[in-house]
Amino acid sequence: MIEPRHRQRAAASRGSPNGWLLGAPPAVFLLVFFLAPALLMVGASFQEPGEFGGLAPLLQDGRLNLSLESYRFFFGDRIYAEIFLRSFIVAAATTLICLMLAYPLALAIAQSAKRRRDLLVLLVILPFASNFLIRIYAWIVLLGPAGLLYTPGAVIAGMVYVHLPFMVLPLYANLEKHDPALLEAAQDLGAGRWTRFRRITLPLSLPGVWAGSALVFIPVLGMFAVPELLGGTRDMLIGNLIKEQFLDNRDWPLGASLSILLTVGVLLLAGLSAWSARPRRSVP
Amino acid sequence: MKRGAPGLWAAALSVYAFLYVPLAIVVLFSFNDSMLSAEWVGFTTRWYATLFADQQMLDAAANSLFIALSAASLSTVLGTMAGLAMARRRSAWLGGLPLLVLGPVAMPELLLGVSLLLFFRQVLDLTLGLLSILIAHVTFSIGFVAVVVRSSLAMLDESIFEAARDLGASSWQTFRHVTLPLIRPAVLAGFLMSFTLSIDDFVITFFVAGVGVTTLPLQIYSLIKVAVTPEINAVSTLLMALTLTLIALAAKLAPDALKGRL
């Protein structure tokens, strides 16, 4: 039977007046204040710095003032490569420590009684609800009297603390879905606790590991407040470098090209992680 | 259900301790009768008194409150519209809307902050201040509201809209008397979420605030950079209490929509 036209329309409209009228104001707002600035950033990375900071005029003496100068600058000076490398090392160390802390926690929650799981997950998220600066500040209070502040270790401790829930949640979401029958079968066949973990739980949890790692690794790269508050002058990371170009040196083209390079790096990593976590055919 | 090994629980408990001990120390020292956050001397509430006598802090709090209320109102209106539009299925041009709405949520905060700074100064030649902060906060909050509203719409039974039509309601009447009352909890939850996001935001605000205007997080940042004082502990404790209350409220209003999206 063919449904009456007005019914089709009612179902399609989901109880609201004109869809495009509703969608237009938020779309226009975001085109102006999200998409335009993002595109502007790409453009700015090919412009030249202005005499007094900012950007040089796009048209000068009748020619288009575009260049690869900022990118050349980046690749021409070792210091930038070192900061990028250091940022990737800090991000990798943070991710690894988060993984080591989050795995046992996520596993313990996934193995606890069903009615308690929501509460245990909430307890992981709750500290995360406090202001980001307060969570960093807590480490100043904690490490200051011990004389451990302004070291690479303090930066990593702060990074781990700020990002830990991002690792716990995807891991838990994965571990919670494992079929306990698999472990029971392995036990009946004589596999010990360690073998069961290594041969069943761990391989099945790898998509969760990849998802969590991406959620930790990527934001660490853009973080400037943690190194600034907990680290020393030598602990500068990409985030600090970008912040410096925009606020202190006012070399916007360099800041923009650093941001573009960071974005490209992040997108490559996100793609890699999505590819690693892709659903695979599993043994039935 | 089989229980995990005792070693696993010991590890899990120490991770919980790792999560809570630093914040507990901040709260504890906000009541400590000593300038130094090193050892416990005695109980006092004088740091809270100092806090409420600190004019700069009060100004920053007033700015934060003004921005959070306006940003939350604006992003609730725009986010609800986006959520409603995204829930409709037959509209080709709306295909790009989710990308626009969720883009600012997925983009690293630092990059959103510097791109807005670039845009405000270079294109609009806008003097940075309350307005630029407000626009920035609306930009990243719309997505959160839209997602909550869309998921609450997805849970509604379509036949109620058909019923309203069959009874002769116009599309506006259907919206006013059927849809809106049903999604009201999600809209309110979206408002509270954007309020929380706005009052808590540091990174993006840092870039678009300019020199004249401070918000609570910016004020806390400039204090932390100088020294550790019990006053920071006190303001942190109050801010934590506020955020927790708002999140609890939002979770009560739309428990399913908020699950896993904190």
Image: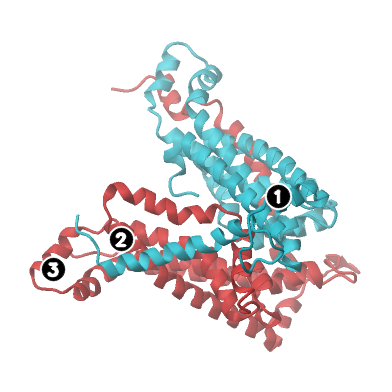
Residue B9: percent from the left, percent from the top? 32, 64
The chain letter corresponding to cyan is B
Which residue is farthest front?
Answer: B42
Q: Give the residue displayed 52% in from the left and 20% down from the top.
A: B171
**What's the amino acid at mark 1?**
Tyr
Q: CA distance from mark 3 to mark 1?
A: 59 Å
Visual colour scheme: by chain
- Labelled disc at residue B48: 1
Give the quarter of the image for residue A99. bottom left
The answer to whether residue B141 is seen in the rendering is: yes
Would you say the residues marked 3 and 1 are in contact, meaning their CB atoms lie under 8 Å apart?
no
The image shows residue A114, relative to residue A248, as above or below, that is: above
The chain letter corresponding to red is A
Same chain for mark 3 and mark 1? The answer is no
Element type at mark 1: helix
- Labelled disc at residue A175: 2
Residue of label 3: A186
Q: Depth check: B226 or A64 in front?
A: B226
Horizontal arrangement in the rendering, residue B35 relative to residue B87 (left or right): right
Residue B228: percent from the left, percent from the top? 70, 66
**What's the amino acid at mark 2?**
Leu
- Classify 10 Å Cα crowding around label 1: few (below 14), some (14-19), many (20 and above): many
Horizontal arrangement in the rendering, residue B203 relative to residue A104 (left or right): right
**What's the amino acid at mark 3?**
Ala
Which residue is farthest top?
Answer: B167
- Classify 10 Å Cα crowding around label 2: few (below 14), some (14-19), many (20 and above): many
Q: Give the residue displayed 91% in from the left and 69% down from the top.
A: A61
